[in-house]
Image (spheres, rainbow, N blue to C red):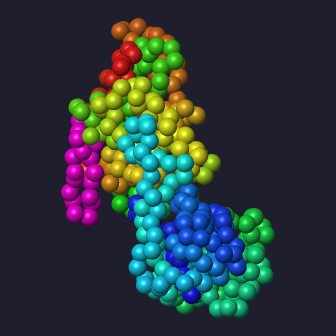
């Protein structure tokens, strides 16, 4: 028997959720035939079979989360069991739109498939449940329709006891069943926790006068250009910071992560080299990225490497916020909803269009003066008429 295990999907991804099986147990399949689609935190990946043979068993159901090295499929195959590379997924094709990376109809990876014993990976036996519990407690959880992986054990070394399951079931009955976070939302929760543990955040706020803007001005692109201009004047915020080694890397190119809200959760695709691109080129690139995000076909590489981040939440609602800095970046800009306000302009009270801005920075790497100068540069850029 041969076992096809979940391969290393690259880009720092350690787990994936089964979306759909394309084969059945007992089915004879050919090499490179599509086996299963899995969802990572960043994209949906199709995994082809590395060998021809009969499918003896499929490990896991749609919705199960597997880790790298967990068995996916057991084959009855004549292929030699060498424990070495037997196949490779083709590289993604280059996109025609310059966004800084590549896209495909469905994201694929260039990682390798390994055939071997299901015991070869230390994580193999923890494929579907990490919970410490006896078989009888697991049976009780199934009978009461409790997700045992969501239960906090009160026994020795965190072991889950029968009363833990019963208590959880009572809460389900009173409050409704809990939902285990998957995919993008799961990764978002982990990322926010990481930020909370490692970043020393400080936020400053101001209001930009945008009354000179032409009708129909592209708000997001103006913000992108303003951020690029501010990074040029105050480069200390366009930085990667390594808190463990207390070092920072000054980034000459401005790669802007732009938060995109979806039903699945928050995505942050990266718009590359914004300081050397026209407004039209940036808009085309962002439209392409957003389309790929909505379709869940964006390659993981398109969401890595941001040097600074923008959250343009004002397209929906809100004025000020305290957006979250995600390491290794040191700054994020939040743009609120443009509104009319009475302001003093050239010594007179006037009704003018203004945009509230919020800047959160990591005070370990950025001084208050650097942050204030950066925000002032953004305000100056946004106050101008249309730019190219």
Q: Is residue 114 left or right of residue 21?
A: left
Quadrant for the N terminus, please.
bottom right
Image-quadrant location for residue 370: top left
Q: Answer whether residue 327 is magenta in the image.
A: no
Q: Residue 137's x, y, as percent? A: 69, 88
Q: Does 7 appear above or below 383?
A: below
Q: Is residue 28 left or right of residue 117?
A: right
Q: Residue 144's x, y, as percent? A: 77, 79
Q: Residue at x 54, y 59 (%)?
A: 45
Q: Residue at x 27, y 47 (%)?
A: 239
Q: Give 45 or 319, whichever is nearer the viewer.
A: 45
Q: Does 266 appear above or below 229?
A: below
Q: Does 136 appear above or below 58?
A: below
Q: Residue at x 64, y 91 (%)?
A: 134
Q: Residue 29's x, y, as percent? A: 63, 72
Extent of the magenta region: 234-252
Q: Residue 179's x, y, as percent? A: 67, 64
Q: Answer whether residue 242 is magenta in the image.
A: yes
Q: Residue at x 55, y 48 (%)?
A: 105
Whether residue 289 is visible to the viewer of this picture, yes or no, is yes
> Number of callouts in the render?
0
Whether residue 65 is visible to the viewer of this picture, yes or no, is no
Quadrant for the C terminus, please.
top left
């Amino acid at each position: 028997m041969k076992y096809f295990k979940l391969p290393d999907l690259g880009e720092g991804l350690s787990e994936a959720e089964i979306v759909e099986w394309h084969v059945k147990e007992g089915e004879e399949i050919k090499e490179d035939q599509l086996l299963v689609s899995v969802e990572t935190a960043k994209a949906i990946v199709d995994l082809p079979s590395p060998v021809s043979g009969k499918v003896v068993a499929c490990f896991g159901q749609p919705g199960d989360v597997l880790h790298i090295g967990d068995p996916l499929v057991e084959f009855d195959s004549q292929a030699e069991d060498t424990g070495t590379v037997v196949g490779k997924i083709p590289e993604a094709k280059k996109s025609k739109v310059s966004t800084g990376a590549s896209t495909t109809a469905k994201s694929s990876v260039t990682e390798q498939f390994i055939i071997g014993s299901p015991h070869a990976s230390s994580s193999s036996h923890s494929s579907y449940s990490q919970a410490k519990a006896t078989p009888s407690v697991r049976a009780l959880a199934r009978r009461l329709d409790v997700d045992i992986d969501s239960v906090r054990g009160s026994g020795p070394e965190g072991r889950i006891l029968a009363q833990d399951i019963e208590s959880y079931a009572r809460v389900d009955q009173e409050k409704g069943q809990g939902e285990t976070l998957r995919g993008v939302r799961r990764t978002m929760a982990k990322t926010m926790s990481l930020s909370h543990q490692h970043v020393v955040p400080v936020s400053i706020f101001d209001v930009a006068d945008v009354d000179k803007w032409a009708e129909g001005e592209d708000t997001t692109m103006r913000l992108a250009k303003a951020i690029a201009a501010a990074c040029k004047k105050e480069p200390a915020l366009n930085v990667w910071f390594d808190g463990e080694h207390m070092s920072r890397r000054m980034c000459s190119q401005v790669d802007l992560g732009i938060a995109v809200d979806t039903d699945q959760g928050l995505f942050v695709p990266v718009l590359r080299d914004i300081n050397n691109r026209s407004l039209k080129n940036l808009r085309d690139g962002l439209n392409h990225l957003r389309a790929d995000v909505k379709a869940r076909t964006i390659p993981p590489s398109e969401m890595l490497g941001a040097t600074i981040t923008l959250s343009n939440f004002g397209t929906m609602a809100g004025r000020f916020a305290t957006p979250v800095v995600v390491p290794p970046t040191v700054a994020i800009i939040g743009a609120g909803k443009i509104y009319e306000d009475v302001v003093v302009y050239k010594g007179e009270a006037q009704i003018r269009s203004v945009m509230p801005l919020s800047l959160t920075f990591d005070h370990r790497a950025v001084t208050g003066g650097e942050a204030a100068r950066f925000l002032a540069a953004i305000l100056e850029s946004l106050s101008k008429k249309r730019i190219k």
